[in-house]
Image (spheres, helix red, strand yellow):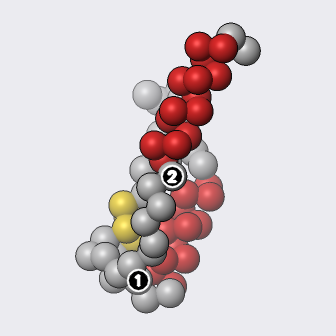
Amino acid sequence: MRETDRRHAELLWRRRLTGHGTRPADVAAAPGGTDPGVAAHAAGLYQRGLTPVADPPVSRGRDRG
């Protein structure tokens, strides 16, 4: 991996780590494409009573665009 690519990846990762705690919200929007972990996390927030609505990701098959 080139040094520039590594620095860019690290910057993106750090921006993702906001340090905010989990708190109640009106909805859990879970964009994530095909990552089932994103939907599972949104469902967990719903099950813990932190959101009344969980909007899981909807993934279209690559062949359907």
Is label 2 in a helix, a strand or a loop?
loop
Dot 1: what SS?
A: loop
Give above or below for 17 relative to 4.
below
Q: What is the three-letter code of the residue carrying label 1?
A: Leu
**x and y percentages locating residue 3 in the rendered image:** 66, 14
Q: Identify which amino acid the numbered label 2 is placed on.
A: Leu
* Quadrant placement of the C terminus: top left
Q: Is residue 3 rendered to the left or right of residue 53? A: right
How far, Cα to Cα, is label 2 from label 1?
20 Å
Q: Which residue is mark 2?
A: 17
User: In x, y percent, where is residue 51?
Assistant: 36, 80
Quarter residue 29 falls in: bottom left
**Dot 1, crowdedness within 10 Å: few (<14), some or many (≥20)?**
some
Which of pointers 2 and 1 lies earlier in the amino acid sequence? 2
Query: Relative to 50, does residue 30 appear above or below in the rendering?
Result: above
Location of mark 1 (residue): 50
Q: In the displayed image of the protein, which residue is found farthest to the bottom?
A: 49
Whether residue 49 is visible here, answered yes or no, is yes
Residue 48 percent coordinates (x, y): 50, 87
Residue at left offset 48%, top offset 47%: 16
Which residue appears at 45% of the width and 74% of the height? Answer: 22
Closer to us: 46 or 25: 25
Category of crowding for the residue at label 2, using alpha-carbon neighbours closer than 10 angstroms: few (below 14), some (14–19), many (at least 20): few
- Indicate the quadrant where residue 26 lies: bottom left
Q: Residue at x 55, y 40 (%)?
A: 13
